Image (cartoon, rainbow, N blue to C red):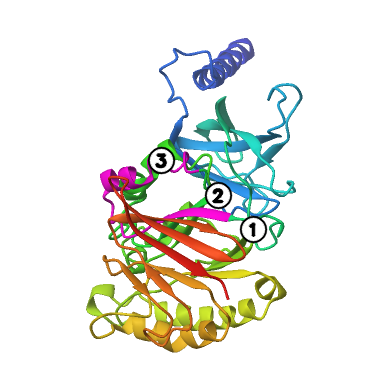
Amino acid sequence: MTPKKILLLNLLLLLNASLIEAQSTLQYSPGTEPSNSFPKPRIACGPWIQAAGETEFTVVWETNVPCISWVEVAPDDGTNFYATERPKYYESRYGRRPVSTLHHVRIKDLQGGTRYRYRVFQQALLLDEGNKRMIFGEAYGNDFNFTKIEFKTKTLDPSRSESRFTMVNDIHGEDSLFRRLTKDVVKEKIDFVIFNGDMLSQIESTQQIVDGYMKSASELFSPFIPIFAVRGNHEHRGSASYDYMRWFPTSTNEPYYTFRDGPAFYIAMDCGEDKPDNDIRYYGLSLTDQVREEQAEWLKQVVASDEFKSAPVKIVILHIPPYSKGTQWHGMREINRLFMPILNSAGIDLMLSGHLHSHHYLEKGTTDNNFPILINSNKTRLDAIIDKERINLKIVDADGKIVHNYLIKND
């Protein structure tokens, strides 16, 4: 072959490689293919507000395809959202923006007790060739507007006169019941919602969280009203139980934490499993005795803190109560051994529990308790209004009927 032919062949090969490269780029360039060539990123579930504090909150949502994401925020001051460029907040995982279907964006440096508007955005990953090349699609966003919210944490403005919330527990994935209990949450003008454990019977996949209650929560209230979730014993079970904290992040990055709303300081605790860790049904995976031991040391620090001591009202949220009509199981006995001595000497005003699937109100001294304990059933919700002098509790069934009322005067 002559040098001229060799040169011509090399040129043809180079041209062919360039055409292949161009076609590859064209294939993954947004807008160059029919609109159905690539999946349009959309919100599959959410958003919902987690880890709300005086100056921050975290927005969590799930998308239908892997995306990068961000949130834009504006004060609810009457201006158009597009009146000016709004600050963008990105999820950062060790200095890199993650590509995921579950998104957590922490919004910081906000004003306490202030309403904000926010938009969530996502861009789908179309091509991933590692360091060689990554191609993302167009950005899609959704608008959400807080209706009645103040962001809460341990140091929330103590001048707030009231704290209002709704609590549900032991739903066990019965979504229709969950909807009936929470359908009017926004109308009640509450500050937050408590999920007090056993919202599922086990977590075998995160889709169970969506189908069991979070899809409904997203439709009814969660884009606007913060959720404070604690684990029950059933959240410890299942192949996807490890993902629970990704769906419900906390201010401490642990399943136990505190927050302050108005006059009330809340201690959200993790009850652990109800049976010994070596029970055959846990397959050698359970270490909740260790978690309770560690949590007891954390609890000692909490009740010794100035933030706790300065609060006029002190509330504990704990799925398994330190009480049973029959003989106590292991988890309940450990709660009595580890937690109750600390709480009994800390001036607690009320404990909120579930677990028993029946309603009980325990006055002080019923079960070696120095504070009242409200155990909510699995068929009702609890509505609470708390000020410095009293705690008003209302138990409401799925038909909206008030079935119990309690007035607790703070000591």
As helix, strand or loop, the secondary structure at mark 2 comes to loop
Q: Return the mark for residue 262.
A: 1
Q: Residue 4 location in percent, x, y?
A: 63, 10
Q: Secondary structure at mark 1?
A: loop
The label on residue 184 is: 3
Residue 326 place in picture, x, y as percent: 23, 83
Judge whether residue 182 is colored magenta: yes
The Cα atoms of the two marked residues, 3 and 1, are separated by 23 Å
Span shown in magenta:
163-188
Percent x, y of residue 299:
57, 79
Q: Residue at x 62, y 49 (%)?
A: 57
Which residue is depicted at the point 28% across and 45% down? Answer: 399
Residue type, mark 3 in image = Asp
Q: Nearer the viewer, residue 175 or 7?
A: 175
| Three-letter code, disc 2 | Asp
Q: In this rendered view, identify the residue nearer to me: 185 or 228.
A: 185
In the rendered picture of this protein, how many numbered marks are placed on residues?
3
Badge 3 element: loop
Of the 4 image quadrants, the one containing the N terminus is: top right
Which amino acid, by three-letter code, is at mark 1?
A: Gly
> Would you place residue 307 above or below residue 241 in this image?
below
Q: Are marks 2 and 3 in contact (CB under 8 Å)?
A: no
Residue 345, picture quadrant: bottom right
Q: Position of residue 98 (x, y in %)?
A: 57, 45
Say whether disc 3 or disc 1 marks the residue closer to the N-terminus.
3
Q: Mark 1 Cα within 10 Å, few/some/many (few <14, many 20+)?
A: many
The numbered mark at residue 191 is: 2
Any part of residue 100 in sight: yes
Camera-nearest residue between 307 and 203: 307
Q: Is residue 227 magenta?
A: no
- Within the image, what quadrant is residue 21 found in? top right
Closer to the N terminus: mark 1 or mark 2? 2
